[in-house]
Image (tube, grey):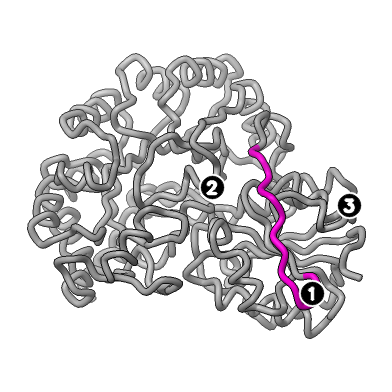
């Protein structure tokens, strides 16, 4: 009987490629040189709540350590867990499920569990397609995984879809965790933190999940479906306690604050930054944010608290494209925000999307020229991906750009589907074209050299620059 108490749980990132596996963000790292490998926060959070419940846990990030399937089999045989928990992405799902099949071949009684944004819509389909998979967790997983581990009857656990003999059953959704301060800090002691580094300095870096939820209805984004349309912030004191644990216990002083709307609540940002300074934390950090939530007072406080970079999702240099995306962004605020970052000494990284259904050569050219005019410290261009559960997916199917149920394997660094105006073949060279036009400018190269006098940082920039150049010219 699979519904039993767990004594041991094995949580893994399968050896199926280096990806950011953060529900709404499922980015392959190949050819994306401005995106660093991040620790598997979903597994770290589950490891923390399971350990608190008395379960012995091991976490393995196989891609991070360049380990393969033979290593997984050996680890599984040595540990002999009661449950295997998989972190998956939509583009790698088919390969990720090899882990469940291998686990069942070794121990037919092991409980195989997975989670991810993919299962918001495709939970029953996944169980139907992959017989070695027992349970799918939908939505936020910290409470769900503990109830599974405690042996609670599966029919009574909200937020799961599971196999019951030859049947597949879908339980009601679980509500979002309102007090996210109640979640224990990620179990960073279960991983080798040394493989997650800040690219420019080579120092240890980890992710801090500062909030959950996003109220904006962007057609391409999974955030509202994954974590709700209401932003839930952790209290500054709770964040400070995790930062101190990272510094004191793990020697980590570089952080990425993961939050769709980090700068949306000025009072919260100011309180956090002032608390960082009051505690005397010698740290540096970056964050993601919207371009229309900034002001100079807040940026200067962020700079004093250690912020060195802000990443913005601008997505397009064409106002009509932004309107169709339902980005709800005031176009005329983009350029002043980037200039404000530079004036306050904080670097800016701007993300753009290529390949939404309305993309044409003309809209792309406008974005290309806008990126050069904007002139942030870094840019990255991603091809859009039609995740199930987004309006983009529905539009793509309706317009005949995608077959219903299709799961493209190409993602972010290669086009997943054509647009109404451009074929896959026409889209393919656009990312490299725009990156060449931006990064190979003498102005950009000179500024990068002048702003980074440290020999160590300059060396790292040269290494990453050479990799970028190799990819762009290939």
| Quadrant position of residue 218 | top left
Q: Which residue is mark 3?
A: 150
Q: Which comes before the other along the chain, label 3 or label 2?
A: 3
Magenta-span inclusion, residue 169: yes
Residue range of the region highlighted in magenta in the rendering: 164-176
Q: Which residue is mark 1?
A: 76
Q: Which residue is mark 2?
A: 226
Q: Residue at x 19, y 57 (%)?
A: 358
The relative height of residue 368 versus residue 286 in the rendered view (above or below) is: below
Q: CA distance from mark 2 to mark 1?
A: 30 Å
Please identify, in this view, whether the residue under mark 3 or under mark 1 is nearer the observer. 3
Q: Does residue 380 appear in this view?
A: yes
Q: Residue at x 60, y 41 (%)?
A: 252
Magenta-span inclusion, residue 60: no
SS type, badge 2: helix
Say few, some or many: other residues with alpha carbon within 10 Å of mark 3 (under 14 / 14 to 19 / 20 or more).
some
């Amino acid at each position: 009987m699979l519904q039993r108490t767990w004594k041991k749980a094995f949580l893994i990132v399968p050896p199926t490629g280096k990806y950011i596996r953060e529900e709404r963000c499922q980015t392959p790292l190949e050819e994306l040189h401005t995106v660093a490998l991040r620790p598997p926060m979903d597994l770290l959070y589950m490891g923390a709540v399971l350990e608190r419940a008395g379960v012995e846990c091991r976490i393995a990030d196989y891609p991070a350590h360049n380990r393969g399937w033979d290593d997984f089999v050996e680890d599984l045989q040595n540990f002999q867990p009661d449950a295997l928990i998989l972190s998956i992405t939509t583009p790698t799902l088919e390969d990720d499920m090899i882990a469940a099949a291998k686990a069942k071949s070794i121990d037919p009684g092991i409980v195989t569990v997975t989670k991810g944004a993919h299962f918001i819509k495709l939970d029953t389909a996944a169980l139907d397609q992959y017989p070695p998979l027992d349970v799918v967790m939908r939505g936020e997983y910290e409470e769900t995984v503990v109830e599974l581990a405690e042996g609670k009857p599966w029919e009574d656990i909200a937020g799961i879809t599971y196999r019951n003999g030859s049947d597949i059953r879908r339980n009601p959704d679980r509500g979002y965790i309102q007090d996210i301060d109640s979640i224990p800090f990620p179990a960073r002691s279960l991983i080798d933190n040394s493989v997650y580094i800040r690219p420019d300095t080579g120092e240890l870096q980890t992710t801090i999940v500062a909030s959950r939820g996003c109220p904006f209805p962007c057609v391409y984004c999974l955030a509202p479906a994954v974590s709700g349309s209401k932003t839930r912030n952790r209290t500054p004191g709770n964040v400070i306690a995790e930062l101190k644990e990272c510094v004191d216990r793990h020697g980590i002083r570089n952080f990425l604050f993961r939050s769709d709307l980090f700068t949306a609540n000025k009072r919260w940002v100011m309180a956090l930054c002032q608390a960082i300074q009051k505690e005397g934390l010698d740290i540096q950090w970056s964050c993601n944010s919207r371009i229309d939530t900034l002001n100079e007072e807040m940026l200067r406080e962020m700079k004093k608290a250690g912020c060195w970079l802000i990443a913005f999702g601008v997505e397009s240099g064409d106002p009509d494209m932004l309107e169709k995306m339902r980005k709800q962004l005031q176009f005329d605020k983009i350029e002043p925000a980037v200039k404000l970052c530079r004036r306050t000494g904080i670097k800016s990284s701007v993300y753009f999307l290529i390949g939404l259904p309305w993309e044409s050569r003309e809209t792309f050219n406008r974005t290309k020229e806008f990126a050069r005019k904007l002139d942030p410290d870094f840019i990255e261009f991603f091809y859009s991906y039609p995740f199930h559960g987004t309006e983009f997916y529905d539009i793509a199917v309706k317009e005949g750009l995608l077959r219903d149920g299709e799961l493209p394997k190409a993602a972010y660094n290669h086009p997943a589907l054509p647009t109404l105006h451009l074929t896959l073949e026409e889209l393919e060279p656009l990312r490299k074209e725009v990156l060449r036009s931006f990064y190979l400018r003498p102005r950009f190269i000179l500024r990068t050299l002048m702003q980074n006098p440290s020999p160590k940082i300059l060396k790292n920039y040269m290494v990453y620059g050479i990799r970028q150049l190799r990819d762009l010219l290939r």
